[in-house]
Amino acid sequence: MRKYDVIVAGGGFAGASAAISAARHGASVLLIEYNNCLGGAAAECLVNPFMPYWTKDENKNKIYLSTGIFTEICDRIASLTAEINDAEYKATDKPMTTFNEEYLKIVLQRMALEAGVRLLFHTKVTGVKKDGDRISAVSVSNKSGIYDIEGDCFIDATGDADLSAYAGCPVRLGRETDGLCQPMTLCFRVSNVDIPRFNEGKSELQKLYKQMRQEGKIKNVREDILVFPTTSDNILHFNSTRIVKRSPVDAEDVTLAELEVREQVIELFAFLKKYAPGFEKAVLVSSGMRIGVRESRMIEGDYVLTQEDLVGCVKFEDSISACNYDIDIHNPEGSGTSHYYFKDGTYYTIPYRCLTAKNNSNLLVAGRCISSTHEAQASYRIMPTCCTLGQAAGTAAAMAVKNGGSVRGIDVSELRRNLQKDGMFI
Ligand SMILES: Cc1cc2nc3c(=O)[nH]c(=O)nc-3n(C[C@H](O)[C@H](O)[C@H](O)COP(=O)(O)OP(=O)(O)OC[C@H]3O[C@@H](n4cnc5c(N)ncnc54)[C@H](O)[C@@H]3O)c2cc1C
């Protein structure tokens, strides 16, 4: 059986960029993904658009905080769109926020293959083999059977910290007070909408939605209708269902969530069909192939990022990522969403120590399940930042392999220099 320098579990923004960066730095890399493509929540749950990944200087010029591989991905989506002359694409969208996930999937797969990453789809990581505090192999399950794959260094980019939990790293779930996570949401798309008419009537529609919720005629606990444009002139994206008080890492709870949320999709679409201007010919065209999970297990790493670090805009000596998206907490118990916004010109950083998992010498974690509190995760969980966390983890893993595999044995100043050379905002 082949052994890899670096094995990445999960192919979302974090896992894809981790695999690409590790391979570009000379490691042999296997990326194991449960589904049929790269892109993670963007591809599987239809999550869109990119939330803001910039701050502004005193002249209101944008300073991008998520760059490197993330910028490459945006540029390649834009050039693919131009190449095939997609008239639907809003070419003026700069910086890219709204994107077409079909283009994202192909761009990520091309970038991974060009870097030399070996991809293994339809495969679930189900466990690990350990030798002391070293992981020697991951156990996987797929149509070929159940078997182990050996590696020197491992990256957990599963979103749910599956690999870390299997490897005995302590994990936390949800708020400190009661363990509740942010709500889960099934996103859906509606086509054939007269969007200018919809936009004109939107504020009246929101009032009616709130009134019908108060009267108990709408069961969805979300306080308003959260809707976004897409790259198409007649398709709208709804991020507006809300399942609370269910655990995203309990299979029975997730099943109940999927059943309940599908009813919410129909409830909201029926409401829109009946009352929304521009919806006369509307068609419910798709929903995510799984419910979207904003928050689930997070590892306990060598450092736990907190809300105080974010609000204090702390610049860590070993920082490998920067962000200033608001602390955006969808109420884990029901209605309401709270925000803490960062001022223009400010941002916080994320230290490398949030990626190193306790009880393991050759495991790094990337994406939404790094070491932090519920409140801190509510900000850095956005796709652009997850992408930068992946790039940092992949580069570090390739360095660790050269130094015997120990993720704590690398020179973090050198890691930061490498990331800067590769275009990241450090
Ligand atoms: C409803 C919702 C709305 C959101 N809205 C926005 C938004 O508007 N803008 C924004 O920027 N961000 C948004 N986010 C946040 C963002 O989408 C995620 O936090 C981010 O995509 C996480 O990236 P990731 O790579 O860490 O994990 P994921 O994208 O979740 O990728 C994890 C991958 O690992 C795979 N996997 C999981 N377990 C295993 C296993 N055991 N074995 C093999 N593979 C496995 C999964 O199939 C998946 O492909 C939203 C999230 C949700 C759920």
Image (spheres, rainbow, N blue to C red):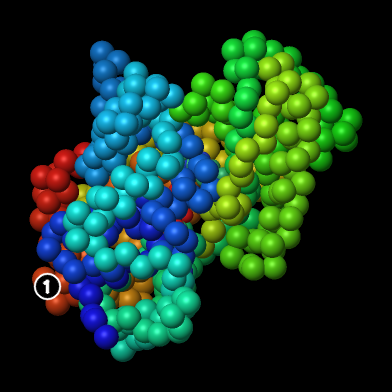
Measured as percent of width and height from the top left, residue 316 is found at 26, 48
Q: Is mark 1 within 8 Å of ligand 1?
A: no
Q: Residue at left 69%, top 68%?
A: 252
Does 39 appear above or below 216?
Answer: below
Instruction: Give the quarter of the figure containing the C terminus.
Output: top left
Q: Is residue 220 above or below residue 120?
A: above
Find numbered disc 1 in the image and state the secondary structure of the residue it sits on: loop
Provide residue 127's location: percent of width, then percent of height. 44, 80
- Percent of width and height locating residue 202: 67, 17
Q: Please give the residue where the numbered disc 1 appears in the rendered image.
A: 403
Residue 299 drawn above or below residue 110: below
Quarter of image, res 337: top right
Q: Give the amino acid type for the residue marked by disc 1 in the picture.
A: Asn
Residue sitting at x 57%, y 28%: 235
Q: Nearer the viewer, residue 313 or 407?
A: 407
Rendered view: 215 above or below 378: above
Q: Which quarter of the picture shows residue 96? A: top left
Percent of width and height locating residue 327: 49, 38
Q: Quadrant of the N terminus?
A: bottom left
Q: Identify the residue shown where x is 59% and y is 12%.
A: 196
Q: Toward the viewer: 73 or 425?
A: 73
Task: Note whether residue 78 is visible.
Answer: no
Residue 266 visible (yes or no):
yes
In this view, the residue in front, 207 or 205, is 205
The quarter of the picture where residue 425 lies is: top left
Mark 1 neighbour density, 10 Å: few (under 14) some (14–19) many (20 or more): few
Judged left or right of residue 241, residue 127 is: left
User: Does residue 409 appear left or right of residue 284 in this picture?
Assistant: left
